[in-house]
Amino acid sequence: MTYINPEPMTQDNTALILVDHQVGLMTGVRDYPVAELKHNVVGLAKAAKALGLPIVTTTTSAETLWGPAFPELVEALPDNAFIDRTSVNAWDDPRVAAAIEATGKLNLIFAGVSLEVCAAFPAMTAQRKGYNAYVAMDASGTFSQTKRETGLLRLSQAGVVVADGASLMVEILADNARPVAGEVYSALDMDWAMLVGQVRASAVPADKAA
Protein backbone atom coordinates (compact mmCIF):
# COMPACT_ATOMS: atom_id res chain seq x y z
CA MET A 1 0.00 0.00 0.00
CA THR A 2 1.37 3.39 -1.02
CA TYR A 3 0.33 6.27 1.20
CA ILE A 4 0.08 9.73 -0.32
CA ASN A 5 -0.43 12.67 1.99
CA PRO A 6 -2.64 15.12 0.08
CA GLU A 7 -1.86 18.12 2.28
CA PRO A 8 1.52 19.15 3.74
CA MET A 9 1.66 19.69 7.48
CA THR A 10 1.46 23.27 8.69
CA GLN A 11 0.63 24.87 12.02
CA ASP A 12 -2.82 25.64 10.62
CA ASN A 13 -3.78 22.05 9.82
CA THR A 14 -2.03 19.93 12.46
CA ALA A 15 -2.75 18.87 16.05
CA LEU A 16 -0.77 16.80 18.56
CA ILE A 17 -2.34 14.02 20.64
CA LEU A 18 -0.32 12.68 23.59
CA VAL A 19 -1.69 9.41 24.96
CA ASP A 20 -0.88 7.86 28.31
CA HIS A 21 2.61 9.09 29.09
CA GLN A 22 1.98 7.95 32.67
CA VAL A 23 4.40 7.20 35.48
CA GLY A 24 3.38 3.55 35.80
CA LEU A 25 3.59 2.86 32.10
CA MET A 26 6.86 4.72 31.62
CA THR A 27 8.56 2.52 34.22
CA GLY A 28 7.74 -0.54 32.07
CA VAL A 29 9.28 0.79 28.85
CA ARG A 30 12.02 -1.53 27.57
CA ASP A 31 12.48 -0.63 23.90
CA TYR A 32 13.79 2.89 24.46
CA PRO A 33 15.86 4.55 27.21
CA VAL A 34 13.27 6.02 29.57
CA ALA A 35 15.21 9.23 30.20
CA GLU A 36 15.57 9.80 26.46
CA LEU A 37 11.91 9.02 25.90
CA LYS A 38 10.85 11.57 28.54
CA HIS A 39 13.20 14.12 26.99
CA ASN A 40 11.66 13.55 23.54
CA VAL A 41 8.06 13.72 24.77
CA VAL A 42 8.65 16.98 26.60
CA GLY A 43 10.54 18.42 23.63
CA LEU A 44 7.73 17.46 21.26
CA ALA A 45 5.13 19.02 23.56
CA LYS A 46 7.10 22.25 23.96
CA ALA A 47 7.80 22.57 20.24
CA ALA A 48 4.13 21.97 19.38
CA LYS A 49 3.16 24.58 21.96
CA ALA A 50 5.65 27.07 20.49
CA LEU A 51 4.13 26.50 17.05
CA GLY A 52 0.63 27.07 18.41
CA LEU A 53 -0.65 23.58 17.66
CA PRO A 54 -3.70 22.30 19.53
CA ILE A 55 -2.57 19.61 21.99
CA VAL A 56 -4.88 16.92 23.36
CA THR A 57 -3.59 14.95 26.36
CA THR A 58 -5.06 11.85 27.93
CA THR A 59 -4.41 9.19 30.55
CA THR A 60 -5.91 5.79 31.34
CA SER A 61 -7.26 5.05 34.83
CA ALA A 62 -4.75 7.38 36.45
CA GLU A 63 -6.04 6.78 39.99
CA THR A 64 -6.40 3.00 39.82
CA LEU A 65 -3.87 1.61 37.32
CA TRP A 66 -1.06 3.60 35.75
CA GLY A 67 -0.73 6.77 37.81
CA PRO A 68 -0.61 10.36 36.56
CA ALA A 69 1.21 11.74 33.56
CA PHE A 70 4.90 12.11 34.37
CA PRO A 71 5.64 15.43 36.09
CA GLU A 72 7.90 16.95 33.45
CA LEU A 73 5.14 16.68 30.85
CA VAL A 74 2.56 18.19 33.19
CA GLU A 75 4.96 21.05 33.87
CA ALA A 76 5.54 21.59 30.13
CA LEU A 77 1.78 21.83 29.50
CA PRO A 78 0.39 23.64 32.55
CA ASP A 79 -2.79 24.70 30.75
CA ASN A 80 -3.68 21.22 29.48
CA ALA A 81 -6.27 19.07 31.20
CA PHE A 82 -5.44 15.37 30.91
CA ILE A 83 -8.62 13.51 29.96
CA ASP A 84 -8.70 10.37 32.10
CA ARG A 85 -10.53 7.44 30.57
CA THR A 86 -10.98 3.67 30.80
CA SER A 87 -11.21 2.75 27.10
CA VAL A 88 -8.21 1.00 25.55
CA ASN A 89 -8.47 3.02 22.35
CA ALA A 90 -8.39 6.69 23.32
CA TRP A 91 -10.67 7.56 20.40
CA ASP A 92 -13.40 5.34 21.85
CA ASP A 93 -13.86 7.78 24.73
CA PRO A 94 -16.41 10.39 23.55
CA ARG A 95 -14.59 13.19 25.38
CA VAL A 96 -11.28 12.39 23.70
CA ALA A 97 -12.90 12.01 20.29
CA ALA A 98 -14.71 15.32 20.77
CA ALA A 99 -11.49 17.08 21.83
CA ILE A 100 -9.63 15.80 18.78
CA GLU A 101 -12.45 16.63 16.39
CA ALA A 102 -12.82 20.08 17.98
CA THR A 103 -9.28 20.98 16.86
CA GLY A 104 -10.60 21.00 13.30
CA LYS A 105 -7.23 19.74 12.05
CA LEU A 106 -6.74 17.26 9.22
CA ASN A 107 -3.23 16.16 10.21
CA LEU A 108 -2.95 14.42 13.58
CA ILE A 109 0.34 13.51 15.27
CA PHE A 110 0.05 10.80 17.91
CA ALA A 111 2.54 9.65 20.53
CA GLY A 112 1.93 7.34 23.43
CA VAL A 113 2.88 4.58 25.81
CA SER A 114 2.48 1.95 24.72
CA LEU A 115 3.32 2.47 21.07
CA GLU A 116 1.41 -0.50 19.66
CA VAL A 117 -1.77 0.25 21.63
CA CYS A 118 -2.00 3.77 23.05
CA ALA A 119 -0.44 5.50 20.04
CA ALA A 120 -1.37 3.01 17.33
CA PHE A 121 -5.05 2.37 18.05
CA PRO A 122 -6.25 6.01 17.87
CA ALA A 123 -3.87 6.72 14.99
CA MET A 124 -5.36 3.85 12.97
CA THR A 125 -8.85 5.03 13.89
CA ALA A 126 -7.98 8.53 12.66
CA GLN A 127 -6.66 7.09 9.42
CA ARG A 128 -9.88 5.13 8.86
CA LYS A 129 -11.92 8.26 9.50
CA GLY A 130 -10.12 10.19 6.77
CA TYR A 131 -7.52 12.09 8.78
CA ASN A 132 -3.82 12.03 7.96
CA ALA A 133 -2.36 10.17 10.95
CA TYR A 134 1.26 10.29 12.07
CA VAL A 135 3.04 8.61 14.98
CA ALA A 136 6.11 10.19 16.57
CA MET A 137 8.13 7.04 17.20
CA ASP A 138 10.75 8.62 19.46
CA ALA A 139 8.03 10.00 21.76
CA SER A 140 6.39 6.55 22.02
CA GLY A 141 7.66 3.57 23.96
CA THR A 142 6.61 0.04 24.73
CA PHE A 143 7.47 -3.02 26.77
CA SER A 144 9.64 -5.09 24.41
CA GLN A 145 11.46 -4.82 21.13
CA THR A 146 9.01 -7.29 19.60
CA LYS A 147 6.10 -5.01 20.49
CA ARG A 148 7.92 -2.07 18.92
CA GLU A 149 8.67 -3.94 15.70
CA THR A 150 5.20 -5.41 15.29
CA GLY A 151 3.59 -2.08 16.21
CA LEU A 152 5.63 -0.34 13.53
CA LEU A 153 4.61 -2.97 10.98
CA ARG A 154 0.94 -2.65 11.84
CA LEU A 155 1.05 1.15 11.61
CA SER A 156 2.73 0.97 8.23
CA GLN A 157 0.21 -1.57 6.98
CA ALA A 158 -2.61 0.74 8.08
CA GLY A 159 -1.16 3.69 6.17
CA VAL A 160 -0.11 5.69 9.22
CA VAL A 161 3.03 7.76 8.68
CA VAL A 162 5.80 7.05 11.18
CA ALA A 163 8.51 9.61 11.86
CA ASP A 164 10.51 11.20 14.64
CA GLY A 165 8.92 14.08 16.50
CA ALA A 166 11.64 16.63 15.74
CA SER A 167 11.32 16.09 11.99
CA LEU A 168 7.57 16.61 12.17
CA MET A 169 7.97 19.84 14.13
CA VAL A 170 10.63 21.14 11.74
CA GLU A 171 8.37 20.33 8.78
CA ILE A 172 5.65 22.43 10.38
CA LEU A 173 8.13 25.23 11.17
CA ALA A 174 9.00 25.30 7.43
CA ASP A 175 11.24 28.40 7.52
CA ASN A 176 14.24 28.88 9.80
CA ALA A 177 13.89 32.64 9.47
CA ARG A 178 10.57 32.63 11.31
CA PRO A 179 10.67 34.37 14.71
CA VAL A 180 9.46 31.20 16.45
CA ALA A 181 12.30 29.07 15.02
CA GLY A 182 14.66 29.61 17.93
CA GLU A 183 11.99 28.58 20.43
CA VAL A 184 11.14 25.45 18.44
CA TYR A 185 14.75 24.33 18.15
CA SER A 186 15.36 25.14 21.79
CA ALA A 187 12.36 23.01 22.77
CA LEU A 188 13.77 20.14 20.73
CA ASP A 189 17.10 20.66 22.51
CA MET A 190 19.21 20.72 19.36
CA ASP A 191 22.75 21.77 20.16
CA TRP A 192 23.04 23.90 17.04
CA ALA A 193 19.86 25.91 17.71
CA MET A 194 22.02 29.03 18.12
CA LEU A 195 22.62 28.96 14.37
CA VAL A 196 18.95 29.72 13.78
CA GLY A 197 19.45 33.26 15.03
CA GLN A 198 22.28 33.71 12.55
CA VAL A 199 20.12 32.41 9.71
CA ARG A 200 17.33 34.78 10.68
CA ALA A 201 19.73 37.71 10.90
CA SER A 202 21.23 36.94 7.50
CA ALA A 203 17.73 36.78 6.00
CA VAL A 204 17.08 40.43 6.91
CA PRO A 205 17.76 42.75 3.92
CA ALA A 206 20.71 45.08 4.42
CA ASP A 207 18.52 48.19 4.29
CA LYS A 208 16.38 46.78 7.10
CA ALA A 209 19.28 45.66 9.29
CA ALA A 210 20.27 49.23 10.09
Image (tube, helix red, strand yellow):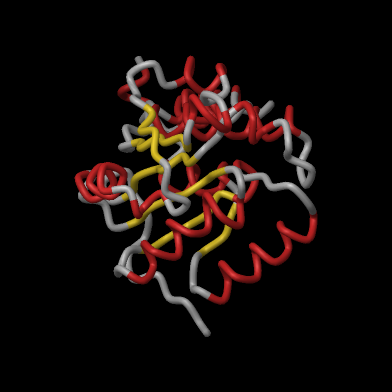
Between 203 and 102, the residue placed more toward the observer is 102
Judge whether 138 appears above or below 81 on screen: below
Judge whether 22 appears above or below 147 on screen: above
Between 210 and 121, the residue placed more toward the observer is 121
Judge whether 29 appears above or below 6 on screen: above
Q: Residue furthest bottom?
A: 1
Q: In the figure, residue 163 lies in which quadrant?
A: bottom right
Screen quadrant of the C terminus: top left
In the image, taking residue 154 as reference, residue 52 lies left or right, namely left
Q: Position of residue 44 (x, y in %)?
A: 52, 35
For image coordinates 64% across by 62% down, the residue present is 151
For image coordinates 78% across by 51% down, the residue present is 144
In the image, taking residue 40 as reference, residue 59 lies left or right, namely left
Q: Position of residue 24 (x, y in %)?
A: 64, 30
Judge whether 100 appears above or below 77 on screen: below
For image coordinates 38% across by 53% down, the residue present is 108
Q: Position of residue 129 (x, y in %)?
A: 30, 68
Count up the numbered dots.
Answer: 0
Q: Position of residue 169 (x, y in %)?
A: 48, 42
For image coordinates 19% across by 45% down, the residue present is 102
Between 107 and 96, the residue placed more toward the observer is 96
